[in-house]
Amino acid sequence: MLDGLIADKPDISIVLGSGLGDFAKSINIRNTISTSSLPGYPASTIQGHEGKIISGEYSGKSILLFQGRIHFYEGYKINECLLPVLISKKMGAKKILLTNAAGGINPNFHPGDLMLATSFNSINIKKELLEVTGLPTAETKNFLLDFPTEEINKIIRLSAEQENIDIVEGTYWYTKGPSYETPAEIQMIKIFGGDAVGMSTAYEGIFASLLGLQTGSISCITNYAAGISNKKLNHSEVTDTANNVKDKFERLVKRVISLI
Ligand code: HPA
């Protein structure tokens, strides 16, 4: 699909989450493709998701950026939502960093924190994912274990240390959306061990892992999850917080790129 438009094999592919798309400005851009020019590529319908695929360079590393992701809750089929991962694999990437906005559930998390995902809960998407892969269940069971990849997490921790950025760590809990959770749902997720909640990333990460990519995830905690504070949730709070932490996020991700 992108042959000839993006020539370089990426050292890392990065999916930019809600409000984090500005990161693209911090690399040396070689080529930008609007996803609307790609036949069959789902249109981005969410504010803060531009719908661009960018190739570029930073610190001698070749990078493939997805500025805008495809969410399952937008009504697309799961295989369409996995296109950024599939394209990354086809372009030859061996590593992928998934970034996202998430609601904080852990009482120690606050809006503006960056969370390294140590684990994922995606039980409500596994069936769709397994159907898409067509792999025998026994095989997928083994594969599922390597997401997130510890090697990538080590690099993220080291990057945070070198940049003097305090990051938090925890379990990302996937919900399908499209509406935010209710306080009762968040209470349940909290009891079950979820530290942050979001509507993306889990399906991409599992699929990337199935394709043999090393995969990591950084969440920007953009808000307290429903009921954790009395504040009403809205998407502009998500994009505003993401915007406020963009310098910290940019430094962290740039350092990750230089250390991979
Ligand atoms: N819930 C689900 N997804 C999110 C949230 C949230 O509170 N914040 C950002 N993405």
Image: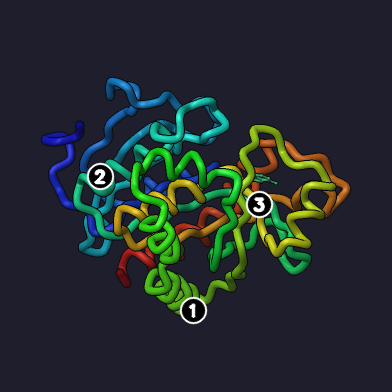
Give above or below for 92 relative to 82: below
Type of amino acid at the residue the image marks with label 3:
Val
Q: Residue at x 43, y 59 (%)?
A: 141
Which quadrant of the figure shows ligand 1? top right
Disc 2 within 8 angstroms of ligand 1 (CB) = no
Query: Does 53 sit left or right of 6 as displayed?
Result: right
Quarter the C terminus occupies: bottom left
Can you identify the residue that label 3 sits on? 197
Q: Vertically, is 52 above or below 187? A: above
Query: Which SS class for mark 1?
Result: helix
Who comes first in sequence, dot 2 or dot 3?
2
Q: Is mark 3 within 8 Å of ligand 1?
A: yes
Q: Quadrant of the N terminus?
A: top left
Q: Nearer the viewer, mark 1 or mark 3?
A: 3
Q: Is residue 60 above or below residue 150?
A: above
Q: Please give the name of the residue rendered at 61% of the width and 63% of the height, measured from the top-left corner.
A: 171
Q: Which mark is residue 55?
A: 2
Residue beneath disc 1:
161
